Amino acid sequence: MSTRFNLEQLNTSAPEVFCAALADIWEHAPWVARGVVQQRPFASVEALHSAMVALVAAQDEATRVAFYAGHPELAGEDSRRGTMTDASVAEQGTLSLARLEAHEAERWNALNRAYRTRFGFPFILCIRRHTRASALQAFEQRLQRDRASELHTALDEIAAITRLRLERLVSDESITRESIPS
């Protein structure tokens, strides 16, 4: 996500450009951007984000669970192998989750297995809002919850993750004449 866009550019770009620009916001789910492209123009980045979250929330449970399943486990094998999306690598890197000591990695692995067994999808957390200790605490607390609560919380966490990604990618600033190359 190195190229930065402003909202006006996204609102007026070709649909395929809009979808490509937002492809990395949603983990392995380009259908989210495709699903909102016809709702343009968006009045704000927040409106764009809200439309995308609403689209995901409107999906049936099986579709949402399949979407959640596309997210990497925190400190999981993909983290240690470096096979996640660039955004996930950067996010998990804020807590050095790819470089855990063996005993720490086993604790995370056990929590990941327990969570996936209990709920049928990986534990999803907006890691940029946590320390390693608070992430572990959230993991343990959420393991005690019911599936309906976790289905809702997973979407809330994805919304937080995607909002931060979107803020890094898109600004609400308009293009000025001075910023347009001649």
Image (spheres, rainbow, N blue to C red):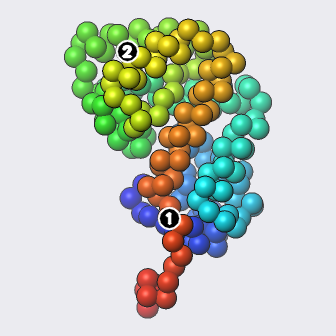
Q: Is residue 105 above or below residue 83?
A: above
Q: Position of residue 54 (x, y in %)?
A: 71, 44
Label 1 residue SS:
strand
Q: CA distance from mark 1 to mark 2?
A: 36 Å
The circle drawn on residue 157 is none
User: Which image quarter: residue 111?
Assistant: top left
**Contact (Cβ within 8 Å) of mark 1 with mark 2:** no
Near mark 1 (Cα within 10 A), the count class, few <14, some 14-19 or many ≥20, is some
Would residue 80 appear left or right of 143 to someone viewing this image?
left
Residue linked to disc 2? 108
Q: Residue at x 58, y 20 (%)?
A: 121
Q: Position of residue 37 (x, y in %)?
A: 70, 59
Q: Position of residue 165 (x, y in %)?
A: 47, 49
Q: Residue at x 53, y 40 (%)?
A: 160
The circle drawn on residue 171 is 1
User: Which image quarter: residue 86?
Assistant: top left
Judging depth in this view, the residue of 112 and 136 nearest the camera is: 136
The numbered mark, 1 or 2, whose residue comes first in the sequence reads 2
Q: Residue at x 46, y 17 (%)?
A: 139
* Residue most extreme to the bottom: 182
Q: Residue at x 61, y 16 (%)?
A: 120
Q: Is residue 87 above or below residue 38?
A: above
| Front disc: 1 or 2 | 1
Residue flagged by tag 1: what amino acid is it? Ser
